[in-house]
Image (cartoon, rainbow, N blue to C red):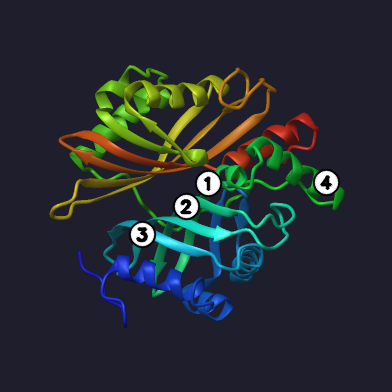
Amino acid sequence: MKYESGKYTSVPDYIYGITREIWEDRGIGRKLQEYYAADILLRAPTGFTGSNEGVVSQTLQTLHQFPDRQLIGEDVIWTGYDDGSFLSSHRLTSVMRHTGDGILGPATGRLVRSRIIADCWVKGGKVVEEWLVRDQAAFARCLGIEPSALARQMVERELQNGQAVTFFLPEHDQLSALEDPVPEDGTVLAITEHLHRIWGEKDTSGVRDLYFSGALLHAPGGDVRYGHDDIDTFVVGYLASFPDAVFQIDAARVNRDIERPVRIALRWSLRGTHSGFGHFGEPTGAAVYVMGMTHLDVTQGRVVSEYTVTDEVSIWKQIHAHRLGCAKG
């Protein structure tokens, strides 16, 4: 399916272009008003935003801390709908220097690289809904601090300022108007079946069936995992922390382009109890919600490259809030 709107002649061009206009070209508020609906619904692990004004505020706060921020587009995987709207899944990496004080603490001057995946539903030429996950653990490590420690600092700052500890839970959301079932596509259905086996049934032997032996997993925290054993270690680290976690795939899309692997974008969630020793340390009994985004490159039915983004700082905030007795309900 083709897409054309004014100066942009394809969905990837549109997504890359408006991102540049807002951030690098400093359009900020004016461009957000042009391209984002006034009542946009934006969900991120950091919290829910239900207005364009909230998006403008967050954008300005980020640019104050990282005024030279560049957003390097890596891929756009998208689906068009009969009403002319489309949903895009945009993978990009922020490259920027921390020169302003803010929620991440005093300016350090350090260079930060962090991956992001953003799903945008664009209708009538405006983004009306968005799901956004930033790898804040990579932020933290580039700044010389562990994600758990940064999360603790954020929780303490919010409490000192008399604010509620902020993070996203599904009950904070507003119902989406988008009907977006998982496509009846053979490759997508096979991949999602493997993922349910691994993450839902906790059968990590499925890693060897899903992934090519030399597969690369670009994992949260700026980490890279290589091959079956390394990928298994990543999966077990999460599942051991949340052994009762319920895994759910919330959205999927697939693109097939000449001379490229089959590319699949997934939005998914884990919800469980921090009741085991694993990637997130000593168990606390905290109820935890994980919003995840994944892009997969698939060849001959097996994953050769995966880009998975979760916000481990926001996960740690949920754990610390529980420890301090101030978890958000």
* Residue that mark 2 sits on: 116
* Local secondary structure at mark 1: loop
* Local secondary structure at mark 4: helix
Callout 1, which amino acid? Asp
Residue at the image position 49 percent from the left and 72 percent from the top: 24
Q: Distance between the residues labelled 4 and 3?
A: 37 Å
**1 or 3: mark nearer the eye:** 1
**4 or 1: mark nearer the eye:** 1
The image shows residue 3 at horizontal and vertical percentages of 25, 71
Q: Residues within 10 Å of mark 3 (few under 14, many from 20)?
A: many
Q: How far apart are marks 2 and 3 (CA)?
A: 16 Å
Q: Which mark is residue 135?
A: 1
Whether 209 is drawn above or below 97: the answer is above
* Residue that mark 4 sits on: 159
Residue at the image position 79 percent from the left and 49 percent from the top: 158
Q: Image check: 127 left or right of 193?
A: right
* Residue that mark 3 sits on: 87
Residue 295 visible in image: yes
* Local secondary structure at mark 3: strand
Callout 2, which amino acid? Ile
Q: Do the residues labelled 2 and 3 touch (CB within 8 Å)?
A: no
Tell me which numbered mark, 4 or 1, is placed earlier along the sequence. 1
Callout 4, which amino acid? Leu
Residue 174 visible in image: no
* Local secondary structure at mark 2: strand
Tell me which numbered mark, 2 or 1, is placed earlier along the sequence. 2
For the residue pair 309 and 181, the one nearer the viewer reads as 309
Q: How far apart are marks 1 and 3 (CA)?
A: 21 Å
Q: Distance between the residues labelled 2 and 4?
A: 28 Å
